[in-house]
Image (cartoon, helix red, strand yellow):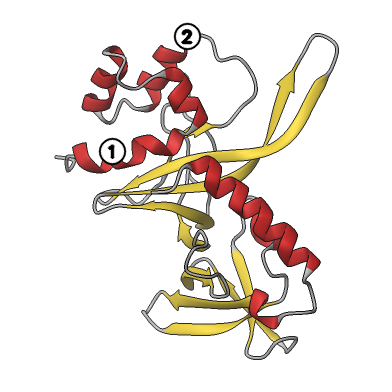
Amino acid sequence: MKPLRLIIAAMAIIVSATVAAKDKDPENYHMRGILADGTEIEGYNETAFENFMFPFVTKVKLADTFGGETRTYTSDELKAVWFTSLGEDSVPVVYHAVKAQKGLPNLWNKNPKPHKKPVFLRLVYNGENVKGYIRPVADYTHGRTMSVTKYTYMIYYLTKDSDVAVAYWCETGDIVPAMKKVMKFYLREFPELVEMVDKGEIKSREFRDNPAFVLPLMDKYYKPKE
């Protein structure tokens, strides 16, 4: 598994490169996908990587030929889609249509409702029991004299016995009070990970710098729901 920060950096580079190469290389728009019935499809996405930088994407447009007439596939019809033009050393750009919580759980709402339709989330970890996803969000950092808005990422886990991806962290520049307690709250579905937080084996700085590093641990300690 590649660290989340490397994946995010790679996404930024890919998007920049794609925008610069727009209308020059059709392969930057080339995609494959799998429909709900298992049929494989192939085509050209009219906006390359750009639309996938926005949250809550529920539709993908593909054309049989580059620049041709497009057909719209909804997230109910299209279960997975990926770009084909990246080399073997590049970070894969794969999206799954996933039911996902609208936001982070909190003490007043421990199980936020999912979006009404599946949304396309980028796959960052593909384990046997747990999958990890990210999506872009706007982060607001408040200071004494000014506030800063930047686009960052929310990260999710999806266990194999659930149909809803659970949000467990949103990257932020703000100070998070009682970070140890916060981690234990978000990792509460995995008692072994909570114990690792108590023992200092999962450290606050490590979690904040790369929240995806706990995904293999979730996969390892996963237990089916009774």
The residue at which mark 2 appears reads as 178
| Horizontal arrangement in the rendering, residue 19 relative to residue 34 (left or right) | right
Please give the name of the residue rendered at 71% of the width and 22% of the height, measured from the top-left corner.
141
The dot on residue 218 is 1
Say which amino acid is labelled 1: Met
Q: Report x, y in % for residue 98.
A: 45, 56
**Mark 1 → mark 2, Cα distance in angstroms:** 22 Å
Image quadrant assignment for residue 172: top right
Please give the name of the residue rendered at 23% of the width and 25% of the height, measured from the top-left corner.
191
Query: First in sequence: mark 1 or mark 2?
Result: 2
Say which amino acid is labelled 2: Ala
Image quadrant assignment for residue 190: top left
Q: Dot 1: few (<14), some (14–19), or many (≥20) neighbours within 10 Å?
A: many
**Does 34 sit above or below residue 90?**
below
Can the viewer see residue 109? no
Q: Report x, y in % for residue 113.
A: 47, 40
At mark 2, the secondary structure is loop
The dot on residue 162 is none
